[in-house]
Image: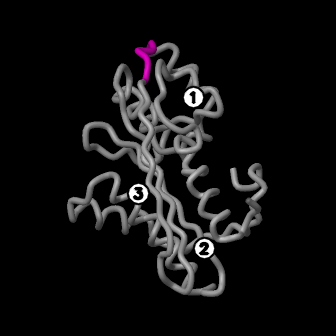
């Protein structure tokens, strides 16, 4: 998304044990919104400490239904289970972005999109998984909206970018404010 928007960047892995951090935060009872924000901040801060002279963007996304957080499915069966739980229901995709500089957060934004999954058949689900597994294994909720996952939904409310995992428009506004991209 950043490349398509013409934003100069270099992608790096933060080296964060995301699963351990997520488990710890959930054990503390944080909300899904705060979980996404905390994980984005953790990633941003980790790299900002290594590169204090740069603006460092950390992002995270959480799929949530009635307080239950959906992880990235580790198997085709887990993806099928997640999608069956979402079938016929409205859930949230929560995307958080945090920018750090000099080892401290300087900007953050959390955005929420609401998605209503249609009442699809089990036959359709199997065909969907035949086409999309294992690519959806890295996707919160078990779908890629930009691919065949679009067929899962009867209604979407919110930013397309948020659903893809980054609150892009608020981020671009901040980067213009900082002079990183043109006004």
Q: Residue at x 33, y 46 (%)?
A: 69
The tag earlier along the polypeptide, 3 or 1, is: 3
The circle on residue 36 is 3
Residue 60 percent across, percent down from the top left: 49, 57
- Which image quadrant is residue 110 in? bottom left
Marks 1 and 2 in Cβ contact (< 8 Å): no
Query: Residue 119 colored magenta?
Result: yes
Q: Residue at x 47, y 58 (%)?
A: 109
Name the colour scheme. Answer: one colour
Q: Residue at x 56, y 21 (%)?
A: 151
Of helix, strand and loop, which one carries label 2? strand
Disc 1 vs disc 2: which is toward the camera? 2
Residue under label 2: 56
Relative height, residue 129 to residue 22 (above, below)? above
Residue 133 percent across, percent down from the top left: 59, 35
Residue 158 percent across, percent down from the top left: 49, 35
The number of callouts visible is 3
Q: Which quadrant, please, contains the C terminus?
A: bottom right
The circle on residue 149 is 1
Relative height, residue 41 to residue 62 (above, below)? below
The tag earlier along the polypeptide, 1 or 2, is: 2
- Neighbor class of circle 2 (other Cα within 10 Å; few <14, some 14-19, many 20+) is many
Q: Which residues are magenta?
A: 117-121
Of helix, strand and loop, which one carries label 3? helix
Q: Give whichever of 174, 126 is nearer the camera.
A: 174
Residue 44 percent across, percent down from the top left: 52, 72
Q: Give whichever of 141, 159 is nearer the camera.
A: 159
- Which image quadrant is residue 7 in? bottom right
How far, Cα to Cα, is label 3 from label 2? Answer: 17 Å
How far, Cα to Cα, is label 3 from label 1? Answer: 22 Å
Disc 3 vs disc 1: which is toward the camera? 3
């Amino acid at each position: 998304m950043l490349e398509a928007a013409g934003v100069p960047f270099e992608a790096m892995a933060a080296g964060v044990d995301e699963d351990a951090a997520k488990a710890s935060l959930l054990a503390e009872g944080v909300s899904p919104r705060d979980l996404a924000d905390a994980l984005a901040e953790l990633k941003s801060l980790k790299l900002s400490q290594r590169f204090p002279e740069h603006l460092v963007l950390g992002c995270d996304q959480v799929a949530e239904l009635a307080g239950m957080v959906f992880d990235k499915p580790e198997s085709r069966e887990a993806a099928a289970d997640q999608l069956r739980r979402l079938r016929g229901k409205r859930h949230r995709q929560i995307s958080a972005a945090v920018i750090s500089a000099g080892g401290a957060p300087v900007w953050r934004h959390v955005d929420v999109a609401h998605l209503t999954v249609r009442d699809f058949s089990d036959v359709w689900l199997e065909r969907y998984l035949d086409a999309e597994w294992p690519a959806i294994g890295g996707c919160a909720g078990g779908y890629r909206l930009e691919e065949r996952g679009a067929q899962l939904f009867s209604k979407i409310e919110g930013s397309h970018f948020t659903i893809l995992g980054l609150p892009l428009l608020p981020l671009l506004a901040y980067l213009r404010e900082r002079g990183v991209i043109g006004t």
